[in-house]
C-alpha cells in the first residue's frame, strides 16, 4: 500500500519488457483504468530471401543458418529488435563495468553479478544505454551533436507481432469498497487480428512482362518478332560474313582420261539419236532393238550392206 504508481507493459511473451514502452497507472479511488489491446501480425514471405539482408533491412530466421560469424544479427531470436537492444546493453555494461546486473542472465560465464562497488559505474553508463547509433547519411544527425551511444546493429525482423494499446480512465459507480488499491481492466479491443504480408512485389518475371507490354504497345513488338529477328540475323551472318564453302558433290574429270570421255560422248550421241528416231517414227515400237533390227532387215532386202558401227549397238 505504500506504492502509489503501477508500471504496466504489454509485450510479447518472447520479449523482455522495456520500461520505455510501459504505462504509468496512478492510484485513483473510484476510477477504472481500461487498457484495450489491438493485435497485428506481419509475416515475411520466402521471396524476401532473394534480396540481400542489408537492402531489405530486416532479417528472417533462415538468415541465421547461412550467416557467417561476422554478421551483426541479434543473439536472441525474439519478436522484434527489443531483445537485440537488451543484449547490446548487456555488452556495453560488461565492457565498461565488467559485470552483469542481477536481473539479467550473464552473457559470459566469466562475468560476475554487479554489486555495490559497481553502482557508480552503472550510473556512468546510464546515458550510454539509452542511446543507440544514429543512422548514417541522414540529415540532422551531426557528429558534434550526437551523445555517447551504443554501437548496436539491430535490424527488425521480417515477421513480428505488434501490440497496440489504448488507455482510458472511467468512473466506476459500482466500486463502493475503497479497500482495493488500483483497478485495471486489460482486454482486447477487437475479436480479430490484422495480418500484413511482406513479399517481393516486383520480380524478374514482372520486369520482363513489363518490358514486353511496353514494347508491344508502342512498337508492335512480340515474341514472334524476336524469333524472326534472330532468324534473319543468322541468315545475314551466314550470307555476308561466313565465306561460302566449296561444294563436295562436284566431279572433276581427269583430262588425261581421254578414252573414257570419248566413250561417254559416243554413248550419249547414240542414245540421243535413238530417242530422236523414236519420236519421229510414225510407228510406236516398244523395244528399240526391234526398231534397229527391222531397219537392218529392210536395208538388206534392198541390197544395202549394214555398216560395221551398228552391229555392236545391236548385239
Image (tube, rainbow, N blue to C red):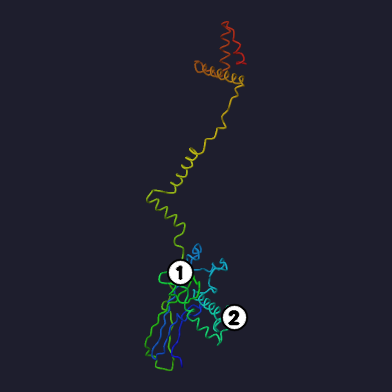
Q: Nearer the viewer, residue 136 or 23?
A: 136
The answer to which of marks 2 and 1 sits earlier in the sequence is 2
Q: Where is residue 313 in the image (x, y as percent from the top left)?
A: 60, 16
Q: Where is residue 119 in the image (x, y as percent from the top left)?
A: 53, 86
| Residue that sits furthest to the front in the current view | 144
What label sits on residue 128 in the rendered view?
Answer: none
| Residue that sits furthest to the top in the current view | 303
Question: What is the C-alpha distance between the residues marked 2 and 1?
Answer: 33 Å
Q: Where is residue 126 in the image (x, y as percent from the top left)?
A: 49, 81
Secondary structure, mark 1, is loop
Q: Count neighbours of disc 2 (C-alpha within 10 A) and say few if under 14, some if 14 to 19, many if 20 or more.
A: some
Q: Quadrant of residue 310?
A: top right
Secondary structure, mark 2, is loop
Q: How many labels does the image show?
A: 2
Q: Quadrant of the C terminus?
A: top right
**Where 225 sits versus 175, above or below?**
above
**Where 311 sits versus 53, above or below?**
above
Q: Position of residue 243 (x, y in %)?
A: 52, 36
Q: Nearer the viewer, residue 290 or 4?
A: 4
Q: Which residue is drawn at 41% across and 85% down?
A: 33
**Where 258 sits versus 204, above or below?**
above
- Look at discs 2 and 1 and give the one toward the viewer: 1
Q: In which quarter of the image is residue 253?
A: top right
**Where 155 sits versus 97, above or below?**
above
Residue bearing the label numbered 2: 111
Residue bearing the label numbered 1: 136
Amino acid at each position: 500500500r505504500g506504492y502509489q504508481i503501477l508500471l504496466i507493459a504489454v509485450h510479447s511473451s518472447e520479449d523482455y519488457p522495456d520500461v520505455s514502452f510501459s504505462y504509468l497507472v496512478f492510484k485513483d479511488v473510484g476510477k477504472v483504468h481500461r487498457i484495450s489491446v489491438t493485435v497485428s501480425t506481419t509475416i515475411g514471405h520466402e521471396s524476401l530471401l532473394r534480396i540481400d539482408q542489408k537492402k531489405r533491412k530486416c532479417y528472417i530466421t533462415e538468415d541465421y543458418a547461412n550467416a557467417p560469424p561476422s554478421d551483426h544479427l541479434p543473439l536472441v531470436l525474439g519478436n522484434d529488435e527489443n531483445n537485440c537492444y537488451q543484449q547490446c546493453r548487456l555488452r556495453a555494461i560488461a565492457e565498461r563495468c565488467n559485470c552483469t546486473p542481477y536481473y539479467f542472465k550473464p552473457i559470459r560465464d566469466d562475468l560476475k553479478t554487479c554489486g555495490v562497488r559497481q553502482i557508480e559505474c552503472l550510473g556512468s553508463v546510464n546515458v550510454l544505454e539509452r542511446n543507440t547509433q544514429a543512422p548514417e547519411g541522414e540529415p540532422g544527425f551531426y557528429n558534434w551533436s550526437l551523445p555517447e551511444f551504443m554501437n548496436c546493429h539491430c535490424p527488425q525482423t521480417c515477421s513480428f507481432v505488434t501490440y497496440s494499446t489504448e488507455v482510458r480512465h472511467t468512473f466506476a459507480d459500482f466500486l463502493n469498497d475503497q479497500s482495493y488499491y488500483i483497478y485495471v481492466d486489460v482486454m482486447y479491443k477487437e475479436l480479430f487480428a490484422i495480418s500484413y504480408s511482406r513479399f517481393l512485389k516486383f520480380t524478374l518475371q514482372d520486369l520482363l512482362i513489363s518490358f514486353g507490354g511496353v514494347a508491344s504497345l508502342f512498337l508492335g513488338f512480340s515474341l514472334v518478332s524476336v524469333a524472326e529477328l534472330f532468324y534473319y540475323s543468322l541468315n545475314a551472318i551466314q550470307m555476308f560474313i561466313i565465306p561460302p564453302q566449296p561444294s563436295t558433290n562436284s566431279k572433276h574429270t581427269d583430262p588425261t582420261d581421254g578414252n573414257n570421255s570419248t566413250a561417254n560422248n559416243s554413248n550419249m550421241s547414240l542414245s540421243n539419236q535413238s530417242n530422236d528416231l523414236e519420236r519421229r517414227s510414225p510407228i510406236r515400237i516398244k523395244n528399240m532393238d526391234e526398231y534397229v533390227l527391222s531397219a537392218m532387215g529392210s536395208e538388206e532386202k534392198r541390197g544395202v550392206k549394214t555398216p560395221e558401227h551398228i552391229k555392236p549397238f545391236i548385239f
